[in-house]
Amino acid sequence: MLPLGELTLLWREVYANYPVPLPFTEDELERFISMSGIDLGLSLVAVVDGVPIGLCLAAAEVADSWVGGFGVVDAYRRTGIGLALMRRQCDALDARGVAHTRLEVMPSNRARRLYATAGFADRRRLVSFNSPALGLGADPLVVLPPTQLPALHRRLHIGVSAPPWQRTEENVMRAVLRDKLTVLAWRSDLGVTAYAVEQNSG
């Protein structure tokens, strides 16, 4: 795997024209890797004539794995390198004993065809929201200690399809503890019926 500085440059080039801006700094990419549980020893980089031109960042826990970053620089797209890279990554995950691999892709992303060719299939639509902090003025919003989050996460996800890889219990707790995030809960007569994790400003 590349040193963090070179990996950051490759990431920025791969995602240069992505619909959602992802111009990570080294610190931001390092944080993303840690939060997502990415295993750099398992992940792959495609190289042509000694120059890195593609990446696949993967993570695995027991029988489940996820791809948290994938792409090829623009000059080498639609050459077959991306598909070869993904297949090589899937082979590495198979060798690890993984039974299921997840990734996310925007509906407009042309890589959907590549993923389908590599054996991936649509499972669900993921809707993501970002919002400025609302503060605690919205009674009955309360702050919970992080120790209550695992049980709450499990209870509120019963009967719901598996969360995306960034929102698994393990990854959420990793981020909460590392970055000292605030766990907010919506309390009603039925008890806590919803929760959110807030990134503190400053």
Image (tube, rainbow, N blue to C red):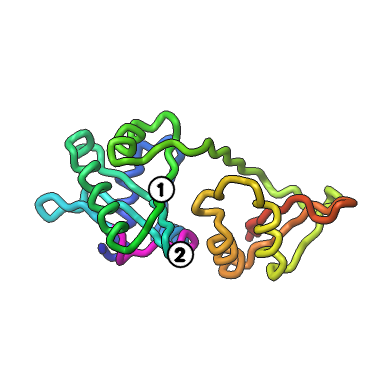
Tell me which corner region of the image, top left, top right, bottom left or bottom right, holds residue 38.
Answer: bottom left
Residue 135 drawn in magenta: no
Spatial CA span between label 2 and label 1: 17 Å
- In front of the other: label 2 or label 1? 2
Give the residue displayed 42% in from the left and 65% down from the top.
Answer: 62
Give the residue type that dot 2 points to. Answer: Ser
Give the residue displayed 61% in from the left and 41% down from the top.
Answer: 129
Tell me which corner region of the image, top left, top right, bottom left or bottom right, holds residue 3.
Answer: bottom left
Tell me which corner region of the image, top left, top right, bottom left or bottom right, holds residue 117.
Answer: top left
Q: Main secondary structure of the magenta part?
A: loop
The tag earlier along the polypeptide, 2 or 1, is 1
Residue 107, position in %: x, y? 44, 31
Residue 60, position in %: x, y? 40, 61
Q: Secondary structure at mark 1?
A: loop
Q: Residue furthest top?
A: 108
Q: Up-down: is 104 above or below 176? A: above
**Left or right of 18: which side holds 118?**
left
Residue 13, position in %: x, y? 30, 45
Front residue of 137 and 144 = 144
Name the residue that disc number 2 marks: 34
Front residue of 180 and 112 = 112
Quadrant (top left/top right/bottom left/bottom right) for the C terminus: bottom right
Residue 18, position in %: x, y? 39, 38
Q: Residue furthest left?
A: 49
Give the residue type that dot 1 points to. Answer: Pro
Residue 35 drawn in magenta: yes
Give the residue displayed 78% in from the left and 51% down from the top.
Answer: 193
Instruction: Report crowding for label 2: few under 14, some 14 to 19, many 20 or more residues within 10 A (C-alpha).
Output: some
Give the extent of the magenta segment.
34-43
Circle number at residue 23: 1
Q: Secondary structure at mark 2?
A: helix
Front residue of 57 and 11 = 57
